[in-house]
Structures are given as structure tokens and as C-alpha cells.
Image (tube, rainbow, N blue to C red):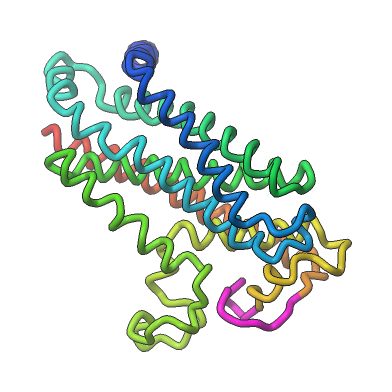
Amino acid sequence: MNSLLTQIKYQLIIQLKVKLQDPFTLVISFIIAPLLGLLTALIFHSNNDIVFNDSYSSFLFFMLVSAIFFGLVSSIFEIVKDLPIVKRQKLGNVSTFSYYISKYFVLSIFGFIQVLLYILVAMFIMGGMLEDYLYNFFIMYLLLLNSIALGLWISSIVPSAFMAANLIPLIIVPQILLGGMIPYSSLDKILFFGVESAIPPVARIVPIMYAYESSLTGHINFHNEDENINDHIVELISYNEGDFLTLDQADKFYCSDMYFCKKTWSYDIGILLIYLFILQLIGYFTLKRRLK
């Protein structure tokens, strides 16, 4: 155990040094985050009070898209470019686990800073309570952690950084299309595979759907005392027995049953945590198998 902990500490130092040795990339990353936050907020800022901002739900969605972008871009090249080094370390009995967990932890630290910068700038313009700041940060960061894990898994599979770069839009675009902002009722029925459901089965494997759903219901919780809560958010939400929330109908649902709302966003957060755990395991064992 001590040997493993020593290796993890050693790998953490190495990974931090590697990141800090490329200050230009770091500066660009930390500039892009607040700039995207500023751009998104300016586009969807139609009222200083988010309760009356009809575009706020759209802001929440593209906030989450930004989290996916940050996570993927920071991680999808990492392992494939490190493979020669990792293979040499493997010959020297350096733990693959220590490398993988250290890589993930360091990327998570820099991702934390990106999300923080994004939220501080965007929410300053959008307005809202402290709960809105904290909850948006939490959901955005949780989705970013999932995206980092997904990026490292893909980076463990692809043969080159060029292929990894080409896969970025292939990963992000389907999540935009299936994440819930576009009503599922408007999608081609072929995506439902003949299943009678308000949500296409393929959309249920998209992490952003659960993050977006949780974000919407969480905000309704925070503003439940205001009957004028963002009408556009409310219009997106309807309850189908056994489906938790769907985002494909215009029936108004003022979430007066607070237990229901809490149950819903807690359920979605639980799904995202399960995703994160599974992606971590798959990524690690994929890398380990590739090194054999």
C-alpha cells in the first residue's frame, strides 16, 4: 500500500509539472472558460431576474455543453500522447493505476478552475441567488468529471491524436441533439426503436440529459415560492408515470410537491455518479489491457 501511495504521489508531481511546463496552453484554457461564460450569458440574458428570463433554460443547457467541451478537450489527447512513456514506466514496474488516477486528478483540478471561472462570469451577468451559483457549479463540474473520464477512456483506445481530435464533434453533437433541449416529440420515430416512451432509448445513455434534467428541477426547488418561476423551464417539464421527468411536452407543472422535485434531481445526480464510476473503471481497464 505504501508503495502504491508513493507512486501516486510521484505521478501527481510529474503530471502537475507537465501541465505547468506548458503555461501557454493553461492560459488559453483559463481565458476560454470565462469568455465562453461571457458569450453564453450575453446571448441568453433577457432579464436581470432569472425567474423572468425565458432563455434561462437554454443558458443552462449550453452551460452543460461547455462542461462537456472542457472535459473532452483537456483529456482526449492525454493518454494517446503519453503511451510511449507509460509503456516504459510499465517495464519499470510503475503502477498503471497510479498513472491513471494521477492523470485524472490533475485534469480535475484544472477543470475545477475552468468551471469556477465560467460560473463566476456567466452567473454575474445572468443574476440569481447563491444557490443558483452553487448548484450550477456542482452540476457543471460533475458533468465535466464525467467528460474527463470519457475522454481518458477514448484516449486509451484511439491509435493517434488525430483520430482523437476527429472524435470530439462525434461525441459532443449527439449529446446536444439528444440532451433534452430539442423536444423529443420532434425527433424521428426511428430513434425510439418501436418503444412506447416519451424519451428515445438512445437518449437515456447520454449523460447531459440527466445533468440538464437535474439542473431544471433543482432550480424549480430553489424558486418554489415564486409562482412566476421561469415559465419556459416549467413548460419543458411534465411527469410521466415511471419516467421521472421528460422534456417533450408543454404541459405546465409547477413543482409544488417538493419531495417529487428533490427525488428527481437526486435521482439524476445518482445516475451521473454511477456513470462516473463506470467510466473510470472502463478507462482504467482499457488502458491496462492496451499496455499488455
Instruction: Please provide percent x and percent y for residue 138.
Output: 61, 43
Residue at (24%, 32%) from the top-left corner?
79
Task: Specify the principal SS of the magenta part.
Answer: loop
The answer to whether 8 appears left or right of 215 in the picture is: left
Q: Is residue 73 above or below residue 19?
A: below
The image position of residue 256, as x and y in percent, is 82, 70
Q: Position of residue 179 (x, y in %)?
A: 47, 65
User: Vertical placement of 156 versus 18: above or below?
Assistant: below
Question: Which residues are drawn in magenta?
Answer: 239-253
- Residue at the image position 68 percent from the left and 62 percent from the top: 217
**Quadrant holding the C terminus:** top left
Residue 229 picture quarter: bottom right
Q: Quadrant of the N terminus?
A: top left
- 44 left or right of 3? right
- The correct choice, above or below, for 216 with respect to 81 in the image is below
Q: Work out whether residue 125 or residue 222 is closer to the camera in this orientation and state it.
A: 125
Q: How many marks?
A: 0
Magenta span includes 179: no
The structure residue drawn at horizontal position 62% and vertical position 40%, both measured from the top left corner, is: 119
- Percent position of residue 234, x then y: 71, 72
Which one is nearer the viewer's eye here, 68 or 143?
A: 68
In this rendering, is residue 178 above or below 274?
below
Residue 215 sits in quarter: bottom right
Q: Give the residue drawn at x 88%, y 61%.
A: 225
135 left or right of 106? right
